[in-house]
Amino acid sequence: KKQQQKMIHQQHHHCDDDSSSASTASTASASLSSSDLSSCEEDQENITNLNKQSIKNKRTQQRKSSSTTTANNKKSKQPRRKHKKTSSPPSSPKEIQIPKELTPQEKSQYIALDAEMVGVGPHGQHSRLARITLANYDGECIYDTLVQVVETVTDYRTFVSGITPQDLEEGGSAIPFEECRSQVLELITDKIVIGHGLKNDFRVLGVTHPWYFTRDTAKYEPFMKVDPTGEKDFIPKKLKVLAKDKLGLVIQEDGVPHCPLEDAVAALELYKKHRTKWEKAMSYKMERTKEITKC
């Protein structure tokens, strides 16, 4: 019986040892598992951080690569812009050489003209030719005559024209209108005519003259002034104003009748002073007119 009790006691002791060992092993296993789990989590976190950094580095590299590619593309496109076709600007007028000094033959192509008029009809409102004067390029008078007026003169305009009734009397020095017209036409045909307000002079003379042979100081834009009424862009200045401002000449003094030769020469001198620029403008207009008429 004692022997059986001893064996039972040994068996219980052995079981306790096994249970203790199992407990120790279980504790060690739990401890190991917790340690390994913590280590795995750290590794996983490190891997995640590495992946994030790798992705960030790749994006940065992609941006740099994209910027470099864009810059290269811009550089590569720059030369192409130089070869890009563009519409050409309108051609400017060619430089035209205008000689400063004229030969005697060239001077003979210029005629300065001025006419004086009287009034007919009610209140003398209609103008008729009463005197006409022509000068050459040197300002020398080459033609000057009084002209007969067939109609009744109602206003001699003496304070401006200097014409008096005695000047136009029959049997005086005044010549018939048709004779005067024929003589003037012979002198100015194919010539450059210079004057101030030539439209009025040609009208009372009953002639027309080509625009490209006309140099009118009343119509030359640099000699004109802005219209204060706004009805037109520019209006003519008076010849006496231009002569004083541009030449320092005093003409058409108040209370003194106009001298047609003096007026013709004043217009001539204005043209001569600005001839180079004026002729360049005229040449350009004539070239443009030729191009338009061809079309």
Image (tube, rainbow, N blue to C red):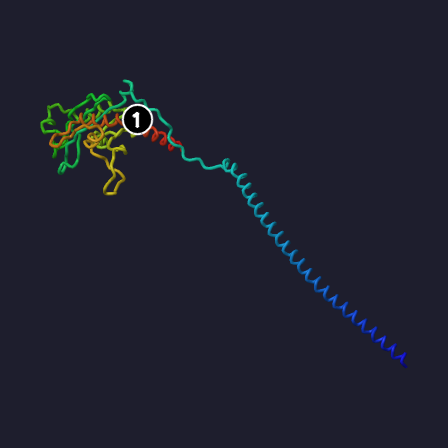
Q: Residue at x 62, y 54 (%)?
A: 52
Is residue 170 in sight in this rendering?
yes
The quadrant holding residue 170 is: top left
**Which residue carries the number 1 mark?**
276
Q: Is residue 67 above or below residue 278?
A: below
Residue 8 is situated, as x and y percent measured from the top left of the image, at 86, 78
The amino acid beneath tag 1 is Thr
Mark 1 is surrounded, within 10 Å at the Cα level, by few (under 14), some (14 to 19) or many (20 or more) other residues, namely some
The quadrant holding residue 134 is: top left
Farthest residue toward the top?
A: 104
- Foreground of the two, 246 or 287: 246
Residue 155 is situated, as x and y percent measured from the top left of the image, at 12, 34
- Foreground of the two, 195 or 13: 13
Residue 220 is situated, as x and y percent measured from the top left of the image, at 27, 32
Quadrant housing the C terminus: top left
Q: Residue at x 58, y 49 (%)?
A: 60
Is residue 152 in sight in this rendering?
no
Farthest residue toward the front?
A: 2
Quadrant housing the N terminus: bottom right
- Would residue 35 be found to the left or right of residue 17 on screen? left
* Local secondary structure at mark 1: helix
- Foreground of the two, 20 or 197: 20
- Would residue 249 be found to the left or right of residue 62 on screen? left
Residue 217 is situated, as x and y percent measured from the top left of the image, at 24, 31
